[in-house]
């Protein structure tokens, strides 16, 4: 009896750069505000909805299709983080809900810090660029949580903003490195050795 084997090959693009860039660019712009360069404004909220939120959700769904549990969880979670953060701000501005106080925001940010810390452990099996993104994001969430919990002054918030800018640019680097390395078919921007 002749049995034929059909092998399906995944020809879809790599969604990770989209997710990393959506996260990174939105994070940089929010943390330029945290660093004191400008007030919270509609540009940040729009980026949070469209690129930090929607683009990461699209990337997460694409990663699910590829069977990548880590990236699916990361991109969908952080995409929904951005949407929830914007929702927190908009609900209060519209008067539809009581604004969150510092203690509530500290709890919110600490939960995201805990989630990110566990995800960071998962990056120990990945390239160094991913470790830098998740490691610096863990620090960022906990700094933000501490800042809200102790009602820290502007100096602490500005310092946290600069750490967030670093975190965002590390994600931008990781995303663009994957794009350029694929386009040129060689390492243009290194991601660091993959740990096995």
Image (spheres, rainbow, N blue to C red):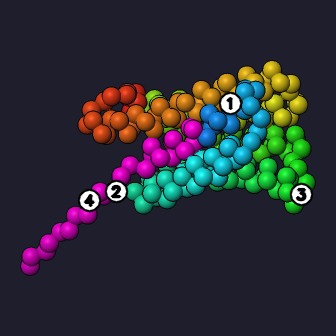
Q: Is residue 91 above or below residue 47?
A: below
Badge nearest the viewer, 1 or 2: 1
Q: Give how far across and how far down residue 67 sits, in percent.
A: 42, 57
Of labels 4 and 1, earlier in sequence is 4
Quarter occupied by residue 165: top right
Q: Quadrant of residue 157?
A: top right
The answer to whether the residues at label 4 and label 1 have Cβ atoms under 8 Å apart is: no
Q: Of the residues tagged 4 and 1, which is closer to the observer?
A: 1
- Mark 4 or 3 closer to N-term? 4
Q: Is residue 12 magenta?
A: yes
> Could you tell me how far apart the alpha carbons at marks 4 and 1 are, in whole angstroms?
42 Å
First to last magenta residue range: 1-25
Q: Nearer the viewer, residue 139 or 164?
A: 164
- Which residue is tagged 1? 32
Residue placed at 79% from the left, 49% from the top? 89
* Residue that badge 4 annotates: 9
- Residue at label 2? 12
Q: Which residue is at a point 42% across and 60% down the rendered structure image?
A: 65
Q: Earlier in the sequence, mark 1 or mark 3?
A: 1
- In the rendering, at what x and y percent does residue 64 appear? 46, 58
């Amino acid at each position: 009896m002749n049995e034929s084997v059909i092998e399906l090959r995944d020809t879809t693009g790599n969604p990770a750069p989209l997710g990393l860039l959506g996260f990174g660019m939105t994070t940089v712009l929010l943390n330029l505000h945290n660093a004191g360069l400008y007030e919270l404004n509609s540009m940040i909220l729009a980026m949070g909805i469209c690129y930090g939120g929607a683009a990461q959700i699209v990337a997460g769904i694409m990663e699910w299709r590829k069977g990548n549990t880590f990236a699916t969880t990361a991109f969908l979670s952080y995409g929904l983080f951005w949407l929830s953060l914007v929702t927190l701000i908009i609900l209060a501005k519209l008067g539809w809900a009581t604004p969150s106080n510092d203690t509530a925001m500290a709890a919110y940010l600490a939960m995201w810090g805990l989630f990110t810390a566990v995800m960071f452990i998962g990056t120990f099996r990945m390239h160094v660029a991913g470790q830098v993104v998740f490691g610096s994001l863990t620090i960022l969430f906990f700094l933000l949580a501490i800042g809200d919990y102790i009602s820290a002054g502007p100096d602490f918030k500005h310092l946290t903003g600069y750490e967030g800018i670093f975190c965002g640019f590390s994600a931008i680097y990781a995303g663009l490195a994957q794009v350029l390395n694929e386009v040129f078919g060689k390492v243009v921007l290194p991601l660091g050795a993959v740990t096995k």
